[in-house]
Amino acid sequence: MSDAHHESNRHFYDRIAGAYDLIADANERAARQAGVSALAVTPGESVLELGFGTGNEVLDLARLVGPTGTVAGVDISPGMLAVTERKIAAAAPAAKVDLRVADARSLPFADASFDETYTSFTLELFPAADIPVVLTEVRRVLKPGGRLAVVSMATVRPGHHVSALERTYVWMHRHFPHLVDCRPIDTEALVAAAGFTVAAVADREIWTMPVRVVTAKK
Ligand SMILES: C[S@@+](CC[C@H](N)C(=O)[O-])C[C@H]1O[C@@H](n2cnc3c(N)ncnc32)[C@H](O)[C@@H]1O
């Protein structure tokens, strides 16, 4: 997939980094926290977050892994990194925190480095051809038996009602991808196709639009 897409995402998230918590936090927080809980992180583990954004879950994960654990994160936007670094400096978590500007399609970590990977509202930003690339990278850096949690806008299940807002959202993504950069994905099918064993799927909603929390095992 063209790097122009990822470059434009970087600029977009750099521009909105300072306001992101105001725009997204209230609506998405509960789903993000459900994803963190579903991972069942324990003290001393090492967790990787893809697309950490404004870092709210970096802080939650750091509390869960505690002083003997590590939270690493990648985000393509230096602006998001700056916001998150300010929060980390203020909260001073005991865990080791290693945040980097990097592309989730090419993770700057050795094979089998992490017990878990967490990502929220990020996988659905990637062009279809890149999603398997990202998930293959996640498999590579997870330890054997390592766990993954993905929180994402998700496709409406067959036979379920498609709300007017859902239709508008998908239409906007198709016609104005520069305004609506993400679209619903079939999260569990994508995770399974990348070779993970899906362990649990929880359906949620944001403003009538389906959101799914999928946990899986390498
Ligand atoms: C919609 S925000 C979600 C942020 C956060 N996970 C949350 O749930 O609030 C998507 C994040 O993914 C990052 N991102 C976009 N493309 C990326 C890529 N190719 N590699 C790593 N991060 C990326 C953006 O910079 C942004 O911070």
Image (cartoon, rainbow, N blue to C red):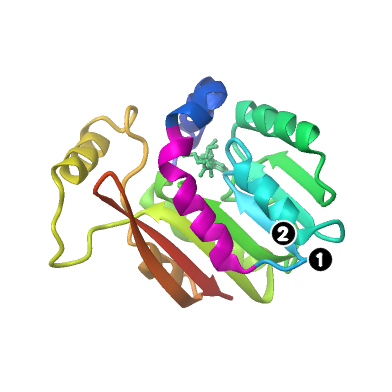
Residue 27 vs residue 193, the one in the foreground: 27
Point out the stretch of residues depicted in magenta: 24-40
At which x and y percent is residue 4? 46, 31
Residue 162 in view in this figure: yes
Q: Residue at x 38, y 62 (%)?
A: 187
* Residue type at numbered disc 2: Leu
Label 2 CB-ligand 1 distance < 8 A: no
Which one is nearer the viewer's eye here, 88 or 81?
A: 88
For disc 1, the marked residue is 44
Q: Residue at x 66, y 50 (%)?
A: 60
Identify whether 155 is placed above or below 180: below
- The three-letter amino acid code for the residue at tag 1 is Gly
Based on the displayed image, in which of its 4 quarters is residue 74 positioned? Answer: top right
Q: Which residue is mark 2?
A: 64
- For marks 2 and 1, give the one nearer the viewer: 2
Reading the chain from its start, which is encountered first: label 2 or label 1? 1
Q: Quadrant of the N terminus?
A: top left
**Marks 2 and 1, Cα distance to the nearest angstrom?**
9 Å
Question: Residue 166, image x and y in percent?
Answer: 21, 45
